[in-house]
Image: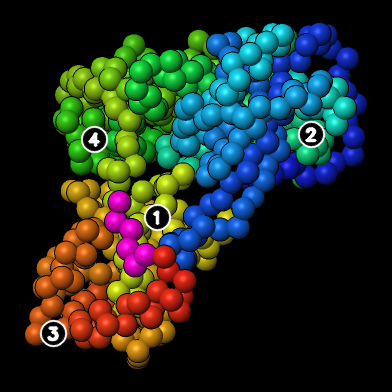
Amino acid sequence: MLVAVSGALARKEPAIPTTAARPKQVALVRVNVTGQGYDYFRPWQKKAPFSKRALGAVLPKGRVLVTADLVTNQNYVELERAESGEKTAANVRVIDYEANLALLEPAEKSFLDGITPLEITSDTVVGDRLAAWQLEPTGALLATEGLVTTVQMMPYPIDVGQFLTYRVSIPMQYRENSYTVPLVKNNKLAGLLLRYDSRSQLLDAIPAPVITHFLREADSQNYRGFPSAGFSFFPTRDPALREFAGEKGKRGVYITNVEAGTPATRAGLKVGDIVTAVGNHDIDENGNYTDPLYGKIEFTNLLTAHAYAGDVVPFHLERDGKPMQLNLTLEHHDTKNYVSPPYNLDEPPRYYVLGGMIFQELSRQYLKEWGPNWQREAPQRLVYMDHFQSELFPDRNRRVVILSQVLPANSTIGYDDLAYLTVKRVNGKEIKSLGDLAEAVKQPVEGFIKIETEEDPKQIELDASQVAAEAPALQENYGISSLQRLQ
């Protein structure tokens, strides 16, 4: 199984560098990053500082391309010229967590002078050879070649939809700057390393078409991100399914879910529809279309790498055996429109502390505090709500407020072991956000704050005057700078 690269690639025996032609000036700079992530178990504080050292690909217009996970939660970013060691601060101009891409600009505009930027090539196909560019400590280029074995749609680390991916068989070497590795074809940028498995020596790469899409959006005044349609589907290989859906041919995919408030809903797409073509591209029973470059590949590529937010895309479908066409106006699915946001990066978590009880809004970032195996290790009820949020909360106009843990205090005696409870109501008022909770606690019922939860104990009572009186001591005892962060 492939795993995300986090810091450096696993050590391998040195590979033989390729003798292919190389540019006189390598379009690479070192990127040094320091930063701090946010602690979702203690949401009023940050985690310990980290440092990362990587590479960036120099592009036209004085920009440097890196992966988003390199500069996420950064405090300071620095560029370093490989041949001279000269350094300058850099700014993150655009970042897209879903596509795992970021653009940097040096604070000193002339810093990249003399470096010939990389052009981008989007014609990579199965069977091509790509060179992974790394730098030796001396600044010399180390290029290791690999073979493109597959071009397919795959989830990226944030796991929001699927994106085009190159899979490359390559004997990568360990280098301290292996966090971001450009993949080059004929001295042109073909992709960036996404993840690497040292055991199988298989590398997944963010391909040039995704990079080109990102750069085109980055040139616009308002970066909109990659588009989404808002539906789920299933292949129609099963003859019984085709008969049930009234599908007359042997093509198309069966719509299994349509999320409320998405382009698919607004266009009128329904569960049970058979989507037979997108634009001019027919879709087979496996959900593939014939791409002129890659051959058979999943049709979602037409909605990510090829289409942009705001584009109107014709969907041809069969409904109850009758052909029809719907026009979907694509848009980016912003994190604020999720019930459980898939990521909350570069911004502090929201929380509310009440008498030692810590209330938070459910997010995947919170669940990921349980580590790489969070889907198994995190509280399963919360994982379930995150995974099936569109089905459980079809209106989407809410967040899930949880009592994440209880700090021992006089006002919470007897409640010390409570954790991971879903809050339904406070003082009789329905809770759909932390803001709702903050307003509800201002109105105690007969001097008590009554908290109702989905799980046992179902009801919690706090003495409102005791909570208020002990708040300063609670802050001092646990080093809590503020008892709430709602924005």
Residue for badge 4: 262
Q: Position of residue 33 (x, y in %)?
A: 64, 39
Q: Which residue is the site of mark 1? A: 349
Q: Earlier in the sequence, mark 3 or mark 2?
A: 2
Residue drawn 22% across and 26% down? 318
80 and 149: which is toward the camera: 80
Mark nearer the N terminus (1 vs 2): 2
Q: Identify the magenta region.
A: 482-487
- The answer for how far apart the CA atoms under marks 1 and 2 are is 37 Å
How far from the left and from the top, in percent, is residue 24?
Answer: 81, 8
Binning the other alpha carbons within 10 Å of mark 1 as few (below 14), some (14 to 19) or many (20 upward) gives many
User: Which-is-in-front pick, marks 3 and 2?
Assistant: 3
Cα separation, mark 4 vs mark 3, equals: 44 Å
Regarding residue 418, the answer to whether it shows in the image is: yes
State the SS at label 3. loop
Q: Which mark, residue 172?
A: 2
**Amino acid of disc 2:** Met
Relative vertical location of residue 152 with respect to residue 453 in this rendering, above or below: above
Q: Amino acid at mark 1?
A: Pro
Label whose residue precedes the other's in the sequence (4 or 3): 4
Q: Spatial distance from mark 2 to mark 4, Cα to Cα?
A: 41 Å
Q: Which residue is mark 3?
A: 447
Residue 407 lies in quadrant: bottom left
- Amino acid marked by disc 3: Gly
